[in-house]
Structures are given as structure tokens and as C-alpha cells.
Image (cartoon, coloured by chain):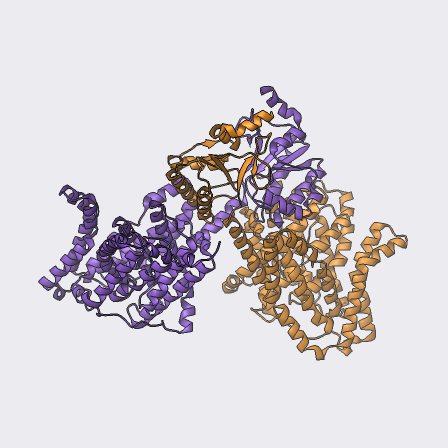
Chain colours: A purple, B orange
């Protein structure tokens, strides 16, 4: 594959064909996305333990960075819930949330995460993200959503509370329950109720009122902005701030200076593991969104290109005074629905946020924190996927175990240990599963040349030839198991003259597996039984030929199990020819 | 399987049939084994940083414990080189070698290791030892042997030296080179030369002198004892101790009181990881020896029973004031050659060492340490297996990488990190290997119903049906890879109507793999291509049936790839019928 500028910078591809029609579509989508993004960016910054303006900063440059290098046409990059939670969890040990040191550390985290993602993309190591299995991701997202929702309850209650685990949070909440602020609670609950209602009922209502389906859907998505405007108005009109309702307060107008992040090597080193985790989670979330949306439009996503795009977006976040960003599912979906056709929509959204930051921040002064918390709670609750967990439980107990482990550790200890525990358990369970492979004695399905398990199918077998299929690659973890099983099978069959190991499911044989095969051949030979192989795959055969295996093999290697039986026990195949 | 006393205590089986003939055979073997064991036990105790008598103590009760519970008839249990090295490496951080605290910690290590082995055996978790792959074991043994040999050079040179890694040891040796003691060096080198010569040339010489093959072999094995007797005589006759030749010195006569090990919970907890490692290495070494020897006599080894036997032997070592023990390859081989028929031979050997400890320890006063070091060096050099490494390199680069990693870390850092690094790398490489599975487009071998890779075989293919075989189970690590590969294959073939995934090598499908299959089915459907499976194994099919997969599958599941083609593109199979 030749490396052309077009490959490295996808923006050169779509940029050349950019025209007025696309501009209009992108602009329209950007307006809707901006309206949705403003409250979200404030709320997620709060979730990450950062001042609200940092959420705005993280929404300006990152979409531009992604637009240049990312491969998805509609992915909306900026602050997202899970990565915000991870940022908070990673940094709270380094500095008090909200302090200048905390902000500086968040910028370093974004820079590190950007460097990691870009490097991984450039070295084409994107497959590493595959270590996060489907159940671990869904368990992680579900548990994070619960944790996020609970972490926001303090804003709804109008109290101080903190904690890493669910238990700590709940305990801290209960301890502060006396200090609860009634007006705040009312505002928060009304906002939650309105947002939940809007999600299910506003769109049909507007549609019934005569609006087009698409327009009514757009407007229903603006419900967050509606609640922001209404609540801000109510708070300032009634002077609720005097009654103890926490508001966003003074958000500095204008931009932070473009700057390099703090260059303290100790801090960078200490944040490295956290940055790795933020990178992998952000990437997995982002790429899942990008894939899902690309499938709807039959576009393709380049995994390594996505890494670079997201990496540059995070570097841009760091330079622009923001914090780690990722692809947002809800905003990308809106982008798609609103008709965005190129990442220019993201650039326009960034411009919208820029304008907001420069001119409109005083408008948020009286915005109650409880409404932002309500926004977060309603957004993350849609991420809790109990059905998926149930399906996983029915399908595979070990997958469910990995998901459950992730959930339990995330809720019980924290997000970082949770994801690590999930990944480790997945790998341990995989190795465990391959350690005792399924083995089947096979016979020929009458009228075919096909061999199947004698326990599941009516098949023709032979007295003198035992056909055994082992359903796993032979490697160190299961090598001895095979040895013992074959020994046991042979011990039960005194009339045996040949043993044929059907290798159709053996995808590789490592050095330990090779030793086992030699041992088996030697033992069978001692008992007067010839050892044969059949259906050995090309790559496996290539390696066997490089070893001294064939000095030990007492029998032959057959192209197919059928060919083996035909030669070793023609009587067993006669039945078939009669049928023919 | 019913649990009978015979099963739990193998000694009850062979004990009932014990007779005079067996007694004589076992006694004779025990005499020879004792003669070999005395110098080895002193030398290995020295290697472990323990006073020589601890080696003797570790040789008395453990064979009795193993005799009761072990399943091998000829395994000689006692001090061995690699476990002694591990003991030293585990304990040097806790107390100065040779100090009473060091001895107490060694006893605790034996007790812990005994408990771990017994527990693992009782819970039938013996398969855990399979995590040590063949290349990691052989790399570990080779590197340990080098480390042991180098660690003994200080005794040959008659200087003080120490270090965990090869480099540290060599540096320390060079630093002390001026203090070298010439008489010690002469004794050491002569002993090494004699032992090396005896190993290859003494037996043929004796045979030529008219002795029977067996007798001459026995006598040549006594070469260690000969060098001990000769060197001790020379040292005491010439008064070489005054010239600075280090000797074994006063070995206390009699036994330590039978006692429970120190019950300091902090010490036990701190030694836990080391005990785990000692257990797994000791077990793997021991069980390999037992298997190899059992194969020669067509006996079987019970893996879990071996664990219990070795566990009880280590508990016995702790109670008797010894240190961790394992099965010795050299002494077990001698046992076998000398005609031992039951583990009673081990009990008699224990009795022989007991007698030695009670009455003969003063005889070792003038035994030069250099001769013991020579014994160790010659014994471990036979463990260095360069040929095996070469074979591994030719056969599999990733197996070689695991072996090389183990060797480099053992030599460069130490034995414990070495084995951990080897095991981790093996697992990482295994996961990596399964992350990009081999895939083949297959066609029918003419004249058969067998399907093979179109790149390796002359086969019949179809224009409208693509048959793809994926050579790996579908699980989270490789799920996305499959998605991308199938997409690419389909993109190249506009005429395609059906895609059949031949599942003969898919041994399981986890939840992530299932998601992938659904996604592939959906995408192919969007392109007007039906998605079919063939040769799905029973256990895989059972799980698919528990999921909602068949709501997504647009095609069928065929018994065999042949059946799929016969139905989906009869024209492609016509050629075959013409040939018939």
C-alpha cells in the first residue's frame, strides 16, 4: 500500500470535493450540535472535577484536530461522560479537584493520551484495543454510568460528597443528608423528570402537533437547552441563589493562552498509566461509535487512522487548555441525523463553542448545577444496558464472569482497577478454556466423506482405527492434558491398531505441543499402535517439517480423515460404497 | 471414581505385595543412592546458603513422606540444585545466609511449599503447572545451571563473592581475584577434571577391565564419593587447612529436635510468593523426572498424587529441620538403574543418611568445599541444553523468544523474575498469535469432498460462493480482525452471492465473536450476500442456539462444506461427478 498524503490526512480527500451544498448541511448540523454541546461540556467538566470553562475549551480545538486526521465523517469529538469520570479518578490523587494543579494535570493527561494514541496509530498497534472484550466494555460502561449518576446526586441534593467507590459515595451522601437544600432538590428533580419525559414523549407530541418527523426530533433533542434556559431564568428571576441553590457562577470570558502543558517529568511519568487507560477507553468508545455510524452510511473506518485522529484531537485539547476528549455517541448520532456530511460540521461546532466562550459565558452565571447534574444523569442512564448483561449470561458464563467482575470492581473499588480486573480475567478465562480442550471420537457420516462426533451423530466407526479430533491448538497449557486423554482412550481399546489424530481444529502446535506429539507417538508405538495425523493445515505442516517430528511419527499424514480410514480400514468404508 | 485408601495412599498398594526379593533390590539401590546423596546433600545445602547438615536433614524424612503418598516408584526426593538456588534467591533478602534466622526461614519455606503443593494436589489443580511451557522450563533450567556453576566458582577460587545476576557474580569474583587461594584452586580444578573424565571415560575403562556393564556403571557413578574420600584424605594428611583451604568443618552430629517451624505470620506471608515459585518449579522438575522414568517401566504417574507426595515430602523436610526438596533426576536415574522397585528404596536411603548424620559427620571435617563445588558444577553443567534451544529456534520463533527471555532475565536480574517473565511472555505471545488468525479461501479437492486452501492445493472453486476457513476460535482479541478481513474479501468479488464460513477450526465463539458474526451477517446482507456457516462443532452450535444469532443469520448452517457447495452452487460440484 503506497503512502499518499490522502491516506495520511483524510481531510485532503473530502476537502477537495467540498461544495456549497455540503457547507449548508454541515452548518445546520453544527448549530444543533452546538446547542447540545454547551450544557454537556459544562456538565462533563464538572464531572471531571474541573471548572466549567475547561469543558468549553475541550470542545473548540479537538473537533478541528479530528477533522484533519480522523477517518469518520460524523464522529463528534469532545468531552464525554466516561472519559471525564476516568479523568477525575486519575487525577484526584494528585491535586484537589478544581485547583490550578488539578487543571494543569488534566492538560498533561490530555497531552500524554494524545501522544499515546498518535504513537499507537502510527505504529499500527490499534489491535491492542481488542484486549477490551465486548462484555468488559459493556460491563465497564454500565458500571461507570451508575457511578457517574450517583456522583451527580450530590449536586441534585445540594450537598458536598465524595468517594471512589459506590459505597463510599453513598456513605458520604448519607452523612451529608441533613444539609440537603430543598430548592436545589426541586430544581434537580424537575429537570430530571422533564428530560426523561422529553426523551420519550416530546418528539411524538411535536409530531402530532403537525411538525415534520425530522424537525420534531431535532427540537426534542434541544430539550437540554430548554431546561438550561428555563432554569437559569427561574433562578435569576426568583433570586434562588440566596436560598442556597448552587449555580455555575462566574465563567471567565475569553480563551486561555495557547500553551505547552507543564513540563514536569515526574508528573508526566506518574500520569503515564492513567493516560494509557484513558487512551484505550476513549479509543474503544470512540471507535465503536464511529463503526456503528459508518455502517449506517456504508463508510469504512480505518482503525489506525482513528487512533491518529483521536490522538491529534487530544493533543489539541492539551494545547487549548482542555482535558481528555473522545467521540461522543449522543452528539455523533445527532450530527448524523442533522445531516452532517463531513468533519467540517465538527469544525463549525468548535467555532460555535469558541463564540460562546468569547461572548456568552456571563449568561451561564445563574445556571443551577443541579440542572447540569440532571443532564448528566439522564445522559448516562441510557448507557446502562441490563439486557446486554442478561444476553451475555445466557450465552456464556465466562463472558458474564468477566463483565460481572468489571462491574463489581468498578463499583466496589474504582474505575481503573475495574477495567484492569476485567481484562485480566478475560485473558485468564481464555487460557483456562483452552487448557482442557474438547475432544471427540469421530466416525464417518454415512453417504458422505465427513467425520463427526460419535456421540452426536449416527456414524460408521472402525474396530481397529480410532479417529480422534481435538478441538484446540496444541500448546503448553494443554499439552499434558492431551497426553493423558489419549493414554486413557487407548487403554480402553485392546483391539486398536491405529490412532488417527484429526487435526482440522489444530491451528498451531508450539514446542510443548510438539514434545507431546512425540511422546504420544512413542507411547503408542510401545503398545503396538501406529500414530497418524489427518487434515493437518498448511501452516502447521510447514512447521512440523522444520522439526524432527517425522522421525518420531510411526504412521502417515493423510490429506483427509476419509483418506485415512480408506487406507487403514477399508472394511469400515465398505458400508458406504454399498449405500452408493 | 471411588475414593479408596489405596488411591489416597499408594503405599498401601505396593506395600501389600512387598516381599523379600523386592527388599533386597531396594536395599541394594539404597546403598548406592546413599553414597551418591551424601556429598550432593552437603553441596546443595551450601548452594542454598545453609550449613551442610541441613542438606542431610533434608534427605532423611522427605523420601519417607514421598514413599507414602507419591505415585512414582523410583523418584528420589531430596535436595536438588535448582530448588536450592531458588531457596537461596528467595531468602537472602530476609536474613544473612547461614544465620539461624536464615535456617528458620528455609524451614518455613519448606513448610509453606509443602502446604501449597498438598493443597493444589487435593484440589486437583495440578494443571496449573502447565503454565510453565517447555521452552520456559528448558530456558530456566539452562540459565539456572549457568548461574549455579558461576556461583560455585568462588569456592573453587577460595574467595568470597556474591550477587543475584550473572554480571554481579562475575564482578564480585573479579574484585576478589587477588585473594585467590592456589591450593584450593588446584583441588577444585583436579576434582572437576576427574569428575568430567569419570562421567565419560570411567565406565568404559572399568568395562574393558572385565567388570559387567552394570557394575562398571554403578562404580563410575561413585566417582563423586571417590573424589570426596581422596580429597578429604589429602587435605588432612597434608594439613592443607593451614594453607587456607576451606573445608566443611564441624558438622554437628545427631539430629535437630523435631519441631514446628517458626510461627511468625509476617514471615509466612512474606515468603508466600517465593514458596509458590519454589512449589511450581520443584513440582515441574519432579513430575518431568517421574514421567520420564515411569515411561521406561510403563508405569503411570498421577499428577495430583505427585503433588500430594511432593507436598508431604516438603512438610516432612520442614518438620525434620531441612529445606525445600524435589525429585532429583540424577539420583532417580541411579535408583532405576540400581534396580529399585518400590519407594522403600527411598526410605532405606533416608535411613542411610540418618545413620550418617548420627555417626559419621566428623569424617567430613576435612572435606574441601572446593570439591563439593566441583560436584555441583559438573552436575549442573549436564543441565545446560543448547541443542534444545537450537531446535526451539528452528521450530518456533515465539517459543524461542519465551526461552530467551527467561534466560536473559534469569542471568541478568535473577531466577524469580526470570521465570515470571518467561511465563508472562508465553501467554502474551499466545494471545498475540491468536489475535490475527490464519484465514484461507478454500475449494474442493477434485475427486473428494474435502476442502483445502486454494493457495496450496489444486481445487475447484465457485464464482458465486466464497468459502472461507478461519483458523482460530472467535473471541474478543481477534473478533474485529475477522470483521475487517471478511469485508476486504467481499469487496474484491462483485459477483458474490454467498459467503460460507467453514467453522471446522472454530473451537468456541465468545460474546465478542458472536457480536462480530452478527455484524458480518448484517453487512453482507446489505450487500446482497447470504451468510452461511458449515462444519460447526457440537459445543459451538449448542451455544449459538442459546443466543439470538439465528435471527441475524441470513443463510443456513450446513453439516459440511461439501453439502454447502452442493446446495449453493451445484455447477461447481458437477466437475466432480464427471470425474466419478
Q: Position of residue A459 (x, y in %)?
A: 56, 27
The residue furthest top is A578
**Residue B126 placement, left or right of B295:** left
Residue drawn at point x = 44 percent, y = 32 percent: B556
Residue situated in front as seen by the camera: A195 or A67: A67
Q: Position of residue A507 (x, y in %)?
A: 56, 44
* Residue A34 figure quarter: bottom left
**Measured along the vertical axis of the image, is residue B455 above or below residue B177?**
above
**Residue B332 placement, left or right of B531:** right
Residue situated in front as seen by the camera: A15 or B3: A15
**Measured along the vertical axis of the image, is residue B321 above or below residue A562?**
below
Q: Position of residue B517 (x, y in %)?
A: 42, 41
Residue drawn at point x = 64 percent, y = 71 percent: B169
Q: Position of residue B411 (x, y in %)?
A: 62, 65
The residue furthest bottom is B178
Q: Quadrant of the C terminus of chain A?
A: top right
**Residue A109 placement, left or right of B125:** left
* Residue A5 figure quarter: bottom left
Residue situated in front as seen by the camera: A67 or A225: A67
**Measured along the vertical axis of the image, is residue B562 above or below residue A103?**
above
* Residue B1 figure quarter: top right
Q: Is residue A48 visible?
A: yes
Q: Is residue A166 visible?
A: no
Amino acid at each position: 500500500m503506497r503512502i499518499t498524503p490522502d491516506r495520511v490526512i483524510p481531510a485532503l480527500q473530502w476537502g477537495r470535493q467540498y461544495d456549497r451544498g455540503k457547507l449548508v448541511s454541515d452548518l445546520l448540523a453544527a448549530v444543533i450540535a452546538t446547542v447540545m454541546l454547551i450544557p454537556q461540556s459544562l456538565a462533563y467538566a464538572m464531572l471531571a472535577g474541573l471548572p466549567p470553562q475547561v469543558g468549553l475549551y475541550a470542545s473548540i480545538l479537538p473537533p478541528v484536530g479530528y477533522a484533519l486526521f480522523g477517518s469518520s465523517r460524523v464522529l463528534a469529538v469532545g468531552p464525554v461522560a466516561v472519559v471525564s469520570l476516568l479523568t477525575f479518578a486519575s487525577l484526584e490523587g494528585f491535586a484537589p479537584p478544581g485547583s490550578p494543579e488539578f487543571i494543569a494535570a488534566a492538560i498533561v493527561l490530555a497531552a500524554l493520551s494524545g501522544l499515546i494514541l498518535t504513537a499507537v496509530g502510527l505504529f499500527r498497534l490499534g489491535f491492542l484495543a481488542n484486549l477490551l472484550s465486548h462484555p468488559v466494555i459493556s460491563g465497564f460502561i454500565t458500571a461507570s454510568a451508575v457511578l457517574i449518576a450517583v456522583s451527580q446526586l450530590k449536586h441534585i441534593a445540594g450537598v458536598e460528597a465524595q468517594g471512589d467507590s459506590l459505597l463510599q459515595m453513598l456513605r458520604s451522601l448519607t452523612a451529608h443528608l441533613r444539609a440537603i437544600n430543598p430548592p436545589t432538590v426541586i430544581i434537580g428533580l424537575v429537570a430530571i423528570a422533564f428530560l426523561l419525559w422529553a426523551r420519550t414523549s416530546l418528539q411524538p407530541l411535536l409530531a402530532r402537533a403537525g411538525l415534520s418527523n425530522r424537525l420534531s426530533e431535532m427540537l426534542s433533542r434541544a430539550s437540554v437547552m430548554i431546561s438550561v434556559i428555563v432554569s437559569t431564568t427561574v433562578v435569576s428571576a426568583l433570586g434562588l441563589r440566596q436560598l442556597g441553590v448552587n449555580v455555575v457562577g462566574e465563567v471567565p470570558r475569553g480563551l486561555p493562552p495557547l500553551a505547552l502543558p507543564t513540563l514536569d517529568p515526574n508528573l508526566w511519568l506518574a500520569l503515564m498509566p492513567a493516560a494509557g487507560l484513558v487512551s484505550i477507553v476513549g479509543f474503544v468508545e470512540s471507535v465503536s461509535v464511529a463503526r456503528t455510524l459508518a455502517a449506517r452510511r456504508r463508510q469504512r473506518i480505518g482503525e489506525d487512522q482513528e487512533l491518529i485522529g483521536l490522538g491529534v484531537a487530544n493533543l489539541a485539547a492539551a494545547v487549548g487548555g482542555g482535558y481528555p476528549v473522545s467521540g461522543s455517541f449522543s452528539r455523533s448520532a445527532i450530527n448524523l441525523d442533522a445531516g452532517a456530511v463531513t468533519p467540517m460540521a465538527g469544525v463549525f461546532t468548535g467555532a460555535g463553542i469558541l463564540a460562546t466562550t468569547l461572548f456568552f459565558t456571563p449568561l451561564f452565571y445563574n445556571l443551577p448545577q443541579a440542572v447540569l447534574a440532571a443532564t448528566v444523569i439522564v445522559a448516562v442512564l441510557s448507557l446502562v444496558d441490563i439486557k446486554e448483561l442478561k444476553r451475555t449470561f445466557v450465552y456464556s458464563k465466562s463472558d458474564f464472569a468477566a463483565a460481572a467482575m468489571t462491574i463489581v470492581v468498578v463499583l466496589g473499588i474504582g474505575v481503573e482497577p475495574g477495567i484492569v480486573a476485567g481484562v485480566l480475567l478475560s485473558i485468564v478465562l481464555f487460557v483456562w478454556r483452552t487448557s482442557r480442550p474438547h475432544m471427540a471420537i469421530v466416525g464417518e457420516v454415512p453417504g458422505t466423506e465427513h467425520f463427526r462426533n460419535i456421540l452426536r451423530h449416527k456414524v460408521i466407526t472402525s474396530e481397529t482405527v480410532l479417529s480422534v479430533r481435538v478441538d484446540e491448538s496444541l500448546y503448553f497449557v494443554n499439552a499434558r492434558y492431551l497426553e493423558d486423554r489419549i493414554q486413557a482412550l487407548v487403554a480402553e481399546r485392546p483391539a486398536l491398531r491405529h490412532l488417527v489424530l484429526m487435526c482440522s481444529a489444530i491451528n498451531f502446535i508450539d514446542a510443548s505441543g510438539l514434545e507431546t506429539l512425540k511422546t504420544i507417538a512413542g507411547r503408542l508405538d510401545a503398545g503396538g499402535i501406529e500414530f497418524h495425523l489427518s487434515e493437518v493445515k498448511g501452516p502447521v505442516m510447514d512447521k512440523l517439517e522444520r522439526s524432527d517430528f517425522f522421525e518420531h511419527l510411526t504412521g502417515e499424514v493423510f490429506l483427509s480423515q476419509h483418506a485415512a480410514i480408506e487406507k487403514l480400514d477399508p472394511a469400515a468404508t465398505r458400508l458406504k460404497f454399498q449405500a452408493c
